[in-house]
Amino acid sequence: MHAFIIHRLAQGALVLLMALTAAFLLMYVIGDPVIAIVGAEADRATIENVRQLYGLDRPLYVQYFSFLTNALQGDFGMSARYRTEVFPLMLQRLVVSIEIALPALVLAICLSILLGVVSAAYRNKLPDYLARIVALVGQAAPIFWVAIMLIVIFSLALNWLPASGRGTWQHMVLPTITLALWPTAYLTRIMRGSILDVLGSDFIRTARGKGLAPMAVLFRHALRNALIPFTTVSAMQFATLLAGSMIVETIFNYPGLGLLMINAIRQLDISLVAGSIALTASIAVVMNLVADILYAVIDPRVSR
Amino acid sequence: MSTAPMTRKDTPVSGSPSAATSMVDREDMSLKPSRTWMHVARSLYRSKLAFFSLIVIGILALIAILGAAIAPYPPSQQNLLHTYLPPAWVEGGRLEFLLGTDNVGRDILSRMIPGARISLLVGVAAVVVGGFIGTVLGLIAGYFGGWVEALIMRLVDLQIAFPAMFIGLIAMALLGTGIVELIFVIALVQWAYYARVARAETIKIKRMEYFHAARALGVRTVPLIARHVLPNAIGPLLVVASFSLSTAIFYEAAMSFFGLGVPPNIPTWGNMLAESRNTLLLNMWAPVFPGLAITITVLAFNLLGDWMRDYFDVTQQNN
């Protein structure tokens, strides 16, 4: 078990190092960090001063190591647009994003367990078909279109909920639903598949053979085992939600990390983009690690 | 052999007795292409959803090929007398503009038809480029092992650790918008999935007897991979390709929607959705049909991918 976790940790650290290297290449090779600090309009003397002041005239490998040491301490420099430290800004916006991402994940997990169980229990009957249609269409409908249609229906036509901004709980409803749709659809399919897998196994036949009621078999035996693959996949969904939040926050003008990153990319705010790369990679690596460890804890066969 | 008693275990829906006889004839030469194709076609026909989605894909391909030739109007023709029209069957709609018009009176249907061509073109091209790069790297990783494999697979890990949209948008912001750029960027965010599958299949095949036999006979590396490894890895790779095609179409629309994909003056489904956002209050119908088109296209390729996954799993079990 320990060896397994250490192996995964090392792998995660390597991915993180590669992500930081990519961020460095982006900042120092493609962009010019001096311009990011002083702006494109600065005169030559200022540029040279700043270049020396920040040690940007040193050889590239020296800069690379100082970038790495700074990055590991959470220091990515200043954002050109917001004129503030990149890392605290990102953390502040991440909290705002989690306000909708966490409810979305919880909603997706609850709905998908429900739909998955119903689907498997009524296999090839009407409820199963309905749940499968929801899952298929939910996976195919592009999230930005869903967001626009929700705005059209609930904000413009019915005037029930605000179409953009942040403040009250009403502002959170549409973004949360939009964000939850894809994971719900995806997790429903996973849940249905893994329950059906478990229902086909020998110990379920034994449980049925000893005369256990179908519902007891489903909930006490099948569901518990089906949750094993489901848990790990759900943990990994958090990284997907981060990507979804870029789209959802842009459309609902919700000031979270996703909107911050999109604007940074659009304006080529290089240090903010580099910080986002590092943060996104860290979140993905940590969530994958959590998923792996969860899997190993729930199902000890994996780590051997 | 041809007079052997007919066993119909394989062919419950086969037609005339002669067809069944020829099936039995070929039982020993199990990899005859014609039989493989028959098997594929029959399985497709039996799976109603896959068959239906194949028809949808066929229609989409036809629309994409014919393009503007079948559109009622040129895509950028403005009709300033008929702006913000709803679809024809809604009150206020006009029959000559079946799906309505946009803010400068351009016919929505006429803009969606060339949009189909771009969606499919970008999707197919991205799958070809990404599939080629990923498959080659995966075959190399699986075949040679060692540090080559370690290097390639860590790159795969790095690629998969990031949300694809995130890297895609950064790459597009650096490269600038354009169709060719978009194709390569989508390939860049998708190659890793092919590499993973190709490597796993290669490792599996390397343990098989026919592979050892071929190597013992002195088949050289490149023909060995191309003729003996790749053909047996093609099934799982096709499954990846089908799902990649649907996500590629989604990425094309999403990146265009953000203004970092196909240049905004070219009508695509994503660009039409982005434009519709600015005038939602005046025309709530404008986003409906481009979004529906993306959904249907993605759904069709997803269903085809589902069928392929089932199909290839089944054959693997039979082997």
Image (tube, coloured by chain):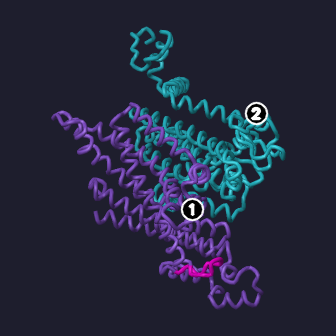
Chain colours: A purple, B cyan
| Residue B102 in magenta stretch | no
Q: Which one is nearer the viewer's eye here, B188 or B229?
A: B188
Q: Tell me which segment is drawn in magenta.
A: A75-85
Q: Which one is nearer the viewer's eye here, A203 or B259?
A: B259
User: Which kind of residue does numbered mark 1 sit on?
Assistant: Glu
Q: Can residue A241 be seen in this view?
A: yes
Which quarter of the rendering shows the N terminus of chain A? bottom left
B145 is higher (above) or lower (below) than B1: below
Determine the secondary structure under disc 1.
Answer: helix
Q: Residue at x 66, y 82 (%)?
A: A37
- Residue count near mark 1 (Cα–Cα under 10 Å), binned few <14, some 14–19, many ≥20: many
Q: Where is residue B3 in the image (x, y as percent from the top left)?
A: 43, 8
A219 is higher (above) or lower (below) than A301: above
* Residue B205 in which image quadrant: top left
- Chain under label 1? A
User: Which kind of residue does numbered mark 2 sit on?
Assistant: Leu
Which quarter of the rendering shows the C terminus of chain A? bottom left
Give the numbered dot on residue A209. Answer: none
Q: Position of residue B174 (x, y in %)?
A: 68, 65
Give the numbered dot on residue B95. Answer: 2
> In the displayed structure, does residue B133 sit left or right of residue B286?
left
Q: Where is residue B291 in the image (x, y as percent from the top left)?
A: 63, 45
Q: Which one is nearer the viewer's eye here, B144 or A62?
A: A62
Q: Is residue B31 visible?
A: no
Q: Which residue is drawn at 62% across and 34% down?
A: B57
Determine the secondary structure under disc 2.
Answer: loop
**Badge 1 is on which residue?**
A249
The residue positioned farthest toward the left in the image shown: A210
